[in-house]
Amino acid sequence: MSESIISADLVDKDNAARRANLERDYTSLGERLDRRGIAIDVIRDKVEKFAVAIPSWGVGTGGTRFARFPGAGEPRDIFDKIEDCAVIKQLTQATPTVSLHIPWDKADPNRLKQAASRFGLGFDAMNSNTFSDAKDQTLSYKFGSLSHADAGTRRQAVEHNLECIEIGKTLGSKALTVWIGDGSNFPGQVNFARAFERYLDAMKEIYAGLPDGWKLFTEHKMYEPAFYSTVVQDWGTNYMIAKELGDKAFCLVDLGHHAPNVNIEMIVSRLIQFKKLGGFHFNDSKYGDDDLDAGSIDPYRLFLVFNELVDAELSGAEGFDPAHMLDQSHNVTDPIESLMLSAVEVQRAYAQALLVDRKALEGYQDSNDALMATQTLKAAYRTDVEPILAMARLKTGGAIDPVAAYRAAGYRTKVAAERPVVAGGSGGIV
């Protein structure tokens, strides 16, 4: 049996105080959904099984290019991060896996596996880092990594990705995510075609190192840290990469890696249609890659993304098996609280999408009834599914109100007393 960070008695006590109201709300919602021909328990059961991975780096305080303000009880290393992730998993019952970033989280893989197994945690996709320079690194990635003009630098980046695969094999991971910051800041700085050719050649070496049963996720981003051109700048380029590499290569969609007005849900549909959707990094944005809490700015867009995912799930789309992970930077909130609420918001969008009357929607689409088609989506989106989410947590041993239980436990105060204070004033996201 796995260990718990927060006292089970405390969670039970908090749940007991809220259970009667939850049961009344759940019954009321069930009656209303029944009139729409929807069985609430079926939706709850699906929500129980829906999971999203926690990024190890997400439990630390983020920052901007200008400053970083560390929070109390910052994790000192990957083992502290695993404990923080265990709290999120215990209270939400929605985050059973952790996604590691190498070399940030580099440690003895067997020790990592043992530390995670204490809390019933597994490991999601491995993430390589060739967008910044590590301590004692021989060659710099200042001017690129997998697309660098220097063959030695490209070789170093390839070897790092292969090392991530080896670590992941021990941990039980089944995927490698590759995101690079390669690009240019000035016209004429790089030859677009040659840089992309070098990138593809390097990625083919990494792809060849994938074990059986593994997937390779490539991630696009329109800008930053390269501001004039980016080697993997959009979903079209990402799709070309996945097609060029082979059947084990898929496209990863980060919700913050697009221009503000891009129709992300249509991109999701296209990638599903052509069997190249690998998964998601969930966050939200206002201006660019803000890495805000999922659903904090545009929850309707998150719902529309899940509308496409549920449509594919229910229709049995071939090869449909996307991975889900949060990828956020928490600058002014407790990262654990933000990640718990973000996991809940992702589940909320999934539950709402399950409520869409798909038969009616298809009829309105076929008859070109634009108004009723969009109202069909709105009817599902406007439904308060909170009782479903809370009941799913209660049934699986989580907290009806995760943030309230977390605050009552005093976990942040406890770890703040154990973990040394981190000096502030540094710049950049870490």
Image: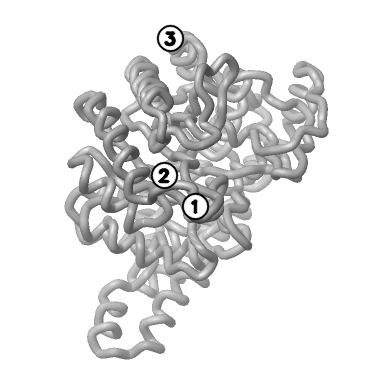
Does residue 410 sit above or below 14 in this rendering? above
The residue under label 3 is 110
Of labels 3 and 2, earlier in sequence is 3
The residue under label 1 is 346
The residue under label 2 is 324
Quadrant (top left, top right, bottom left, bottom right) of the C terminus: top right
Provide residue 251's location: percent of width, then percent of height. Answer: 33, 48
The residue mark sitting in front, 3 or 1, is: 3
How far is disc 3 from disc 2 in space, using C-alphas? 25 Å
Does residue 72 sit above or below 18 in this rendering? above
Provide residue 293's location: percent of width, then percent of height. Answer: 61, 51
Graded by Cα atoms within 10 Å as few (under 14), some (14 to 19) or many (20 or more), the crowding at tag 3 reads: few
Graded by Cα atoms within 10 Å as few (under 14), some (14 to 19) or many (20 or more), the crowding at tag 2 reads: many
Mark 2 element type: strand
Graded by Cα atoms within 10 Å as few (under 14), some (14 to 19) or many (20 or more), the crowding at tag 1 reads: many
Q: Are marks 2 and 1 in contact (CB under 8 Å)?
A: yes
Q: Residue at x 23, y 85 (%)?
A: 366
Check disc 1 and give the amino acid type. Answer: Val
Of labels 2 and 1, earlier in sequence is 2
Check disc 2 and give the amino acid type. Answer: His
Provide residue 290's location: percent of width, then percent of height. Answer: 62, 53
Check disc 3 and give the amino acid type. Answer: Asn
Q: Residue at x 82, y 31 (%)?
A: 424
Does residue 254 sit above or below 4 in this rendering? below
Q: Residue at x 70, y 44 (%)?
A: 64
How far is disc 2 from disc 1 in space, using C-alphas? 9 Å
Of labels 3 and 1, earlier in sequence is 3
The residue mark sitting in front, 2 or 1, is: 2
Seen from the viewer's position, the closer of residues 159 and 163 is 159
Q: Are marks 3 and 2 in contact (CB under 8 Å)?
A: no
